[in-house]
Image (tube, rainbow, N blue to C red):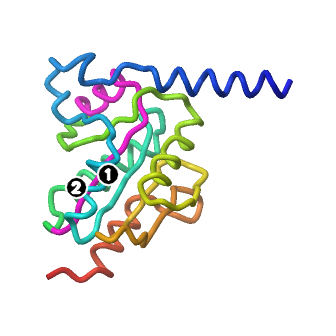
Amino acid sequence: MKKLVVFIITFIHLLGCSLTPFRSAQSNHPYSIYIYDYEKSEIDSIIQHNEYTLIYAWTEWCTASKSQLIEYLAPFLEEKPENIGIVSICCANSGNLIGFLEENNYEYPVYLLSGSIGGLDRWRLNRSFHALFDCYKSVDYVPIVLLCDKQKQIMNWDSINACYDGVGTSIIQIKNNITFP
């Protein structure tokens, strides 16, 4: 039984890794200009060139993730100070992601971790963050919200749950507790 579970997990992981990146699959769609393949070096560069960076990791199947993105993150992107970087990372099926962006007129960059495997998405997002920050901390739900400074010092790393309001809490922290030049 244990070997079967290991085989299934390995198979699902390999399947997710072998999916075609979105840009090469449907680059003719107008909303494709907002979708970028996830690259650690590109996210690293955004962090290093901003005083603070808010990273919002979500999935296209999670209702809370999508509502937080539209209710809190999109309005903040319109008014944010220039020294704040915003990175949106989505575990998604490219077709579903582009449909969601188009339906909600979301015209901001989204970094795509290709494919969506339900509950395993949280593990993929956590693993990406562990590699990006060279540390280990895990959260149990999506969306995952991370706030850091340009030296990659993590100021907040959490997920939406009963005692946390998601990205709205980090935006309030940015507005109230971080002084801007």
Q: Cα distance, mark 1 to mark 2?
A: 7 Å
Quadrant containing the N terminus is top right
Q: Which residue is at a point 62% across and 21% down the rendered structure image?
A: 11
Q: Between residue 40 and residue 181, name the one nearer to us.
A: 40
Q: Does the magenta stretch include residue 98?
A: yes
Q: Locate the C terminus by quadrant.
A: bottom left
Residue at the image point whose x is 20% and y is 44% from the top: 108
- Dot 2 crowding, Cα within 10 Å, few <14, some 14–19, many 20+: few
Q: In this view, does 136 lie to the left or right of 84?
A: right
Q: Position of residue 72 (x, y in %)?
A: 31, 56
Q: Judge whether 45 appears above or below 173 on screen.
A: above
- Side (left or right) of 126 relative to 174: right
Query: Would you identify the image quadrant in which residue 79 lies?
Result: bottom left
Horizontal arrangement in the rendering, residue 28 relative to residue 176 (left or right): left
Q: Which amino acid does label 1 sit on?
A: Glu
The answer to whether 115 is drawn above or below residue 142 in the figure is above
Q: Give the range drawn in magenta.
A: 83-103
| Residue 58, position as x, y percentages in the image | 43, 44
Q: Residue 68 or 83: which is nearer the viewer?
A: 83
Q: Where is residue 90 in the image (x, y as percent from the top left)?
A: 38, 39
Q: What residue type is labelled 2?
A: Pro
Which residue is most to the right?
A: 1
Residue pointed to by mark 1: 71
Which disc number belongs to residue 75? 2
- Image coordinates of residue 164 in percent, x first then y, are 52, 64
Tell me the quarter of the picture where residue 95 sits: top left
Q: Is label 1 in a helix, a strand or a loop?
A: helix
